[in-house]
Amino acid sequence: MVAEVTMTGGCMCGAVRYATKGDPFIVGHCHCESCRKHCGAAFGTLVGFKVDQVAFNGDQRRIYESSPDIGRAFCGKCGTPLTWEGDGGDIGHIVEIHIGTFDNPHALVPTRHAFYNERLPWIDKADQLPRFEGFPDDSPILQYGPSSGSLSEV
Ligand SMILES: [Zn+2]
Ligand SMILES: [Zn+2]
């Protein structure tokens, strides 16, 4: 018998917590404008589950309805974006969780890009910008360019 994978996560202040059971049906980047606005980031990276795989605890998450039946959840105390959730078509009700809110996001690897035509134009260039260890003004340059040899192996 294979043990069910359980992962945990939550918002920045810790008021809203969640636990997920089983494998996500998708781990992927989303370049749609709604994800960009909700995350305040260049794109979103989401981990999708059926609604019954996710249990929230702690404070109730706040939900902004970004379009009919599509909720964008966040913590009412610290404002951390948490999910988009709602009708997933054939899959039923789904909860897609922003990868950065997991306690161990390193365990999850994205496998695709959605809404690629809405991407910011510089997003998938193998840029040669300097990589600093910390704040650029007071830490050393680690390297120029990405750590992986090519983007195709990511
Ligand atoms: Zn919070
Ligand atoms: Zn999106």
Image (tube, rainbow, N blue to C red):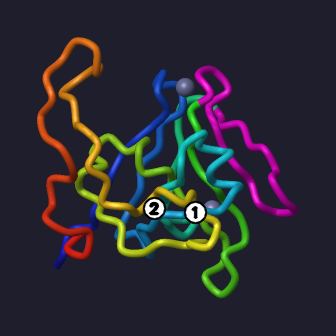
For residue 41, side relative to residue 149 (left or right): right
**Height in image: 92 above or below 20?**
below
Residue drawn at point x = 54 percent, y = 70 percent: 50
Residue sitting at 66 percent across and 78 percent down? 92
What residue did someone put label 2 on? 47
What secondary structure is marked by label 1?
Answer: loop
Q: Is mark 1 within 8 Å of ligand 2?
A: no
- Residue found at the very far right of the displayed protein: 68
Secondary structure category for the residue under label 2: strand
Mark 2 and ligand 2: say if the CB distance to the nearest ligand atom is below 8 Å: no
Mark 1 and mark 2: span between their CA atoms?
19 Å
> Residue 80: x, y in percent?
56, 32
Q: Which mark is residue 101?
A: none
Q: Position of residue 142 (x, y in %)?
A: 12, 34
Please tell me whether residue 68 belongs to the stretch shown in magenta.
Answer: yes
Which of the pair 79/132 is nearer the observer? 132
Dot 1, how many residues are within 10 Å of its Cα: few (below 14), some (14-19), or many (20+)?
A: some
Residues drawn in magenta:
60-79
Residue tagged 1: 119
**Looking at the image, residue 52 lies above or below residue 105:** below
Q: Nearer the viewer, residue 57 or 134?
A: 134
Q: Amino acid at mark 2?
A: Val
Residue drawn 40% across and 41% down?
9
Q: Earlier in the sequence, mark 1 or mark 2?
A: 2
Q: Residue at x 87, y 62 (%)?
A: 68
The three-letter amino acid code for the residue at tag 1 is: Arg
Q: Is residue 90 above or below residue 7?
A: below
